[in-house]
Image (spheres, helix red, strand yellow):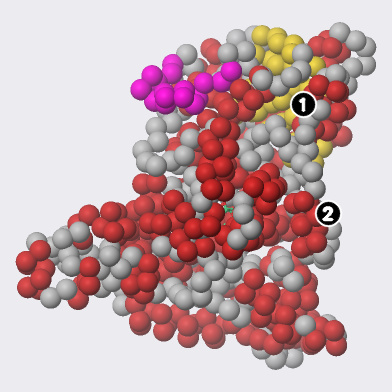
Amino acid sequence: MRDRRAADADNPADTDSLDSAVSATSPQAAVVPTPSEVHGTDNATGYVVWHRKHLRTADQLALTRAVSGGDVVCPLLVFDPAFYGDGGLACDARIRFFHEAVASLDRLYAAAPAPTVTRTAEAPRERLAATTPLSLNETREDDRTAEDSLSGASSPGLTIGYGSPPTVLQRFANKGWTILTMATPTSRYGKRRDDRVRDVCGNSIEFISGDGLVRGQEWSRTNWQTHVETWLNEAPHTPAWSTADTTQFVLETGITPAAIDAAFDISPSKTLVPTGTHRRAAERLRSFVERIHSYPGNISAPQDAREASSGLSPYLNFGLLSVRQVYQSVSEQAPECRGRQMFTDRLVWNLHYNQKLVDWPGWTDTAVNPVFEDFNRDHHDPELVQAWKGGETGFPMVDAAMRCLRQTGWLNFRMRAMCASFFVHILQQPWWIGADWYHHHLIDSDVGINYTQWQSQAGTIGKPVQRVYNPRKQVRDHDPDGDWICRWLPELAPLPNTFLDRPERTPLAVQTDCGVTIGDDYPRPVVDFDARREAFWSRYERHHPAAARQLARPEIAKRASFSGGYDAAKSIAAEYGDSAEDSAADMQLSLSDAASLDEAADAAEDEMGGDGTDES
Ligand SMILES: Cc1cc2nc3c(=O)[nH]c(=O)nc-3n(C[C@H](O)[C@H](O)[C@H](O)COP(=O)(O)OP(=O)(O)OC[C@H]3O[C@@H](n4cnc5c(N)ncnc54)[C@H](O)[C@@H]3O)c2cc1C
């Protein structure tokens, strides 16, 4: 693993910050009661439900278990300062979405049908104000949306803490609470934080696997598809508040999403960003079901996809909806059609890519295949990186996509894949720089999908099938009228559509006529596309046989986490690997392995997770 970043994907500043804000941590140990003090009985059982993702109350296994087993349940969210300021990698729009989701969760808990005990914690405002840029009393009226989406419930339902999560959780554990939380695929900071929580809370914390992913098995992919299908079709977990006779406990700390938003000066500049509430999530799901028949024909062209695809990704990422809730709603309510099948397949892809991160947290930092670990490293050119980030490469489809990403935090699959391919294959820049850029800007950035997709698109796994997108062809195929390009690159609007795939070829007389000078108003291509593509293929093909052979190593096959499991990895190695002396011993091929050679190609295709069309 290289030390290329100070900050993380999960994702904030480094571990040291875990302790840096302890002095301002809330609630303080002294105000955390024991479960018996809340319940008024001896030996009462108390569960804290610690929310990180899975910000919902329905189909939430940690909550369901807590309600069925506890006399008292305390739902808790801890704002972690490590996610803010210079160390944080998320854009303000994603942070705002998260804050809205926390406020919405608070309102859901406030409406839970359970007797509630509320205590007021010693006011932490002074301590917090000393370590945050603004007073916590401050809320910005001008930022409040019509539905006041940052406001929690008038009588809170959620205990909201602030500080290093291990420190806060340890205080509850010390008072006899058991902490339940949903296990989530994590890496870097998130993984270290969770490890630390395990260290400090010991037997008092349980990470519950309730998201359909397989944990704790040597080969997660054995019968994986069956496992996932079973999980998707099982009844969702519903907390039995009314029958369980459970008391809900809230420790009012004075910390609110609005106060944190103001304290850290969260000022989103993006537009078209969805609001992070459960109501909006449900509306979005409902409206998608009504138009699902038009999904297949409209997901490739970027201007159509924004309306035609579900737009559910941020809600799924933060867990306002579970993958299973969406799957079951669509299966039950949408008419049987190709759109329904394509969509539910994609929900499985969500699990498929997240399974990869469960299987190997290294996806965010290290190339899956050691042969590609340093690929493009010596080609690093900060000017090319900057041109890509800023949408100034001279390739209109790439530039429009990159500006759209920056301004709205969303792109459809094809544009994400095309820009990733362009960055790695044509600009020949290290994949992780691009992956981090997406992670910063995407409202839906899901570490389990973003980084695994990046490595998949970049070709760092060693699969036999590699796709290199041609952004000029994408213009002709998906934006022939130039509507989308001109929306994001208004400087090209006066140019006739026929030149939008290669503006640099616009005759000078036409440029003069329409008042656009290529090279001045809009850049010439920063690289020669055909030469770069050829150079990539010759370099990649030179390395590929050695890379394919690596897939026979169990350790590397586990990292790759193909849906076809170890057999698929060994088959690729057998068919495409080079024949170095030691390969036979590494590969441990058997007759049954040889029989699955054909499946290898299928498995490799399956890894693509595309938009259903083959052309690139
Ligand atoms: C380089 C790259 C990075 C990506 N990063 C992310 C990311 O951080 N978060 C994310 O949710 N998706 C990511 N995707 C996948 C895909 O582009 C988005 O899921 C999709 O565009 C989100 O919009 P939607 O919810 O309207 O999608 P829909 O088409 O309506 O799909 C519904 C859901 O299915 C899942 N899904 C759809 N396509 C894929 C896919 N190819 N792989 C895995 N799951 C899929 C998502 O959960 C999505 O919300 C990435 C794709 C690429 C090529």
**Height in image: 435 above or below 601?**
above
Q: Position of residue 413 (x, y in %)?
A: 49, 60
Give above or below for 384 relative to 103.
below
The residue carrying pointer 1 sits among few (fewer than 14), some (14 to 19) or many (20 or more) residues within 10 Å by Cα, namely many
Q: Is residue 405 visible?
A: yes
Q: Residue furthest front?
A: 335
- Apparent side of residue 343 relative to residue 43 in the rendered image (left or right): left
User: x, y (%) of residue 135?
Assistant: 46, 16
Mark seen at residue 216: 2
Residue 152 inside the magenta-drawn segment: yes
Which image quadrant is residue 476 in? bottom left
Q: Amino acid at mark 2?
A: Gly
Q: Secondary structure at mark 1?
A: strand
- Residue at the image position 64 percent from the left and 35 percent from the top: 55
Residue at 72% across, 54% down? 358
| The disc label shown at residue 48, or none | 1
